[in-house]
Image (spheres, coloured by chain):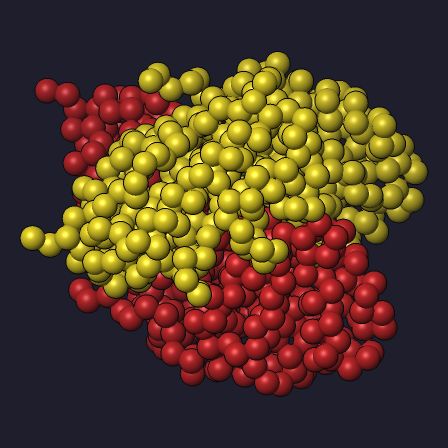
Chain colours: A red, B yellow
Amino acid sequence: MTPPPRGFAEAEFRSRVTRIQAKMQSSGLDAILVTTEPEVRYVTGFLTRFWESPSRPWFVIVPASGDPVAVIPSIGAHLMGQTWLNDIRTWPSPHPTDDGIGLVSDTLAEFTPPKGRIGVPSGAETHLRMPLKAWAELQSRLGARVFAADDDILRDARMVKSPAEIAKSRQACAIANRAFDRVSQIAAEGVPLDQVFRHFQTLCLAEGADWVGYLAGAAGQGGYGDVISPATDTPLAVGDVLMLDTGCVWDGYFCDFDRNFSVGPPMTEVATAHSKLLEATAAAFEAAKPGATAAELWAAIEAVVRGGPDAGRFGHGLGMQLTEGLSILPHDHTILREGMVLTLEPSVEVSPGRLMVHEENIVITATGAEYLSDPATGDLPVLECRP
Amino acid sequence: MTPPPRGFAEAEFRSRVTRIQAKMQSSGLDAILVTTEPEVRYVTGFLTRFWESPSRPWFVIVPASGDPVAVIPSIGAHLMGQTWLNDIRTWPSPHPTDDGIGLVSDTLAEFTPPKGRIGVPSGAETHLRMPLKAWAELQSRLGARVFAADDDILRDARMVKSPAEIAKSRQACAIANRAFDRVSQIAAEGVPLDQVFRHFQTLCLAEGADWVGYLAGAAGQGGYGDVISPATDTPLAVGDVLMLDTGCVWDGYFCDFDRNFSVGPPMTEVATAHSKLLEATAAAFEAAKPGATAAELWAAIEAVVRGGPDAGRFGHGLGMQLTEGLSILPHDHTILREGMVLTLEPSVEVSPGRLMVHEENIVITATGAEYLSDPATGDLPVLECRP
């Protein structure tokens, strides 16, 4: 498979900003200020792992009309200069007394009326990425202007993906698929779990991941205690269920799915649980189409797994972040639309305190859904025991 | 080299909390509320890559006396249960109307007097990791209690590392050293830069990294335009300077240093620049000792590289984050203390718009400093040209 092109055409960014600005008008916002990595990247295309450094704040302003303006540390000027943005303002950061607040407040003042309303993403799954002290200073500098929630405009815009975005997620999924297909090369009875984790990341890179943004998993007799733990050096043992859950990144887009393996032949209850997980995933996939709701996908899964109200969410949106947008939960009534990328992630309790979780990635199409991951079928794959 | 033990003894966490609580008393704080990954981990030991998911807020409360209390999504209960904390309160998250705010406000109310002061990390290099809307709700629920800056108590506590923390950074550095020693196996004329990035991450994993939290770099004729870019697929060419800058993670602690390579024999100005970078690093290393300031290290480097005021910072603190704590800048007068882990990171402009940057990691000792990375010496390493 030929990888899709990297980056996006300028027209795609213009279309994103036009949609955002249309909603800003309905919401009465004169600008939106964004500070987090995915939000900045969504409107600019600025892609770097440098966000791993928390030392500097970054700002992008989407005005009511016209192109976005970047107000960023000078260390980012060269890379931001390669995006579609023309108005890029920089300051030498870190700075002990004014780390960009003077510049961003002047720029906001330039692009908004004196009593203007400035939207800031304020809802679920986002935060303000700047020191609280600097936030207080920014509000104080802007006097009569009001900072308000952005009415989830950024979140909603990001939830429906373009074909170019979907192609990147599909590529990330294809990479992880190929890595999962090779797990029997790196995992068997006696191999320490931390070595499995290390080698699995190597497989993801070998298959084309830009980086492995996320890897969690577990191994335990007849299931595992949780799905977020780092690896220990405990060797895999016969009867263990090994689960690997990865977020490989390709051109800034994540996959997020897992696979389970049995070390030696699975216990009956493990095999049963695995079948139930696949059945639940298939039921959610059947229910997934434009007009259905996240809650309906939850109900389709719950009808199979019968986890009860405390089972946690059974999937979520996916894109530039490992998890974003909707949650597959009984109270999330988000209506599915063509272009949404989701995970389906049922879980079952095999025995008290022992879980199994299965996860696939899908995209909502005009008439239904399509798998981005190669969906697992059949029996739980069995890893080798020592001869 | 045998790796150090993973995790920390309970006594280490108790000592951290005792120091924090002593400063809270001086600052008149009845509790500190932390929300970010390194801050939560510093007081609890909770280590997971699950923070990559932004969907759920996490809270830890350090009361004026007694052990910290975790108020976290139920998906984290099993893993948090393996830390030294006993008081772990959970809610089913994500939740659309009350994603933990009721529980964390009740818990804060339990541990603070009715007009108490609650500290929140608010200064440089931190932020509040929760939705702004939820923050407003939390403040409103706690009525007469005041949220205040934590006077950088968390930041200052984290700046001086324990021997066990230093051992983890040393291990991360040793892993990256071994990977850098193998770069000639993966990089030569004609190899696309993105392949070099992918293979370098594989080397880091092969040498023992838990994961590769950061990789940036560049390749360009006679230097590069910036140091934060992701890789392109441009093949390495004779005359390129290749720079790889990595943050490998071992047991949750970063290294952060880079190496430069010349594809074929280096241009004279590149060789000169490299020598100057090593000389500047050595000068800063000589100046690094308890009682010296960050600004003095900057001056030692600046005396060699003569970059002027816009050259950016020449290093920073390092630990659970790729960058944390002090900045090697003329206005940062932080006094160096035994146990601080730093990067020394001089840069020079080889020609207009063409940089070279060199970076090493050190720890401040009782009498001076010690390298954690194997310091580069001698000439710029040369990568193979096609035969």
Residue reaching furthest left? B387
Quadrant including the N terminus of chain A: bottom left
Which of these two is toward me, B375 or A291? B375
The residue under the point 24% across, 25% down is A191
Tell me the quarter of the picture where residue A9 sits. Answer: bottom left
Which of these two is toward me, A282 or A334? A334
- What is the x, y in percent for residue B149? 79, 43
The residue under the point 64% across, 79% down is A63
Q: Is residue B259 above or below residue A283?
A: above
The residue under the point 68% across, 43% down is B332
Name the side, left or right, on which A72 lies relative to A338: right
- What is the x, y in percent for residue A387? 10, 20
Name the side, left or right, on which B380 lies relative to B39: left
The residue under the point 24% across, 37% down is B182
Tell me the quarter of the picture where residue B119 sits. Answer: top right
Name the side, left or right, on which A298 lies relative to A89: left
Q: Is residue A59 visible?
A: yes
- What is the x, y in percent for residue B127? 66, 48
Q: Is residue B192 visible?
A: no
Which of these two is toward me, B225 or A373? B225
Name the side, left or right, on which B358 lies relative to B196: right
- What is the x, y in percent for residue B102? 74, 44
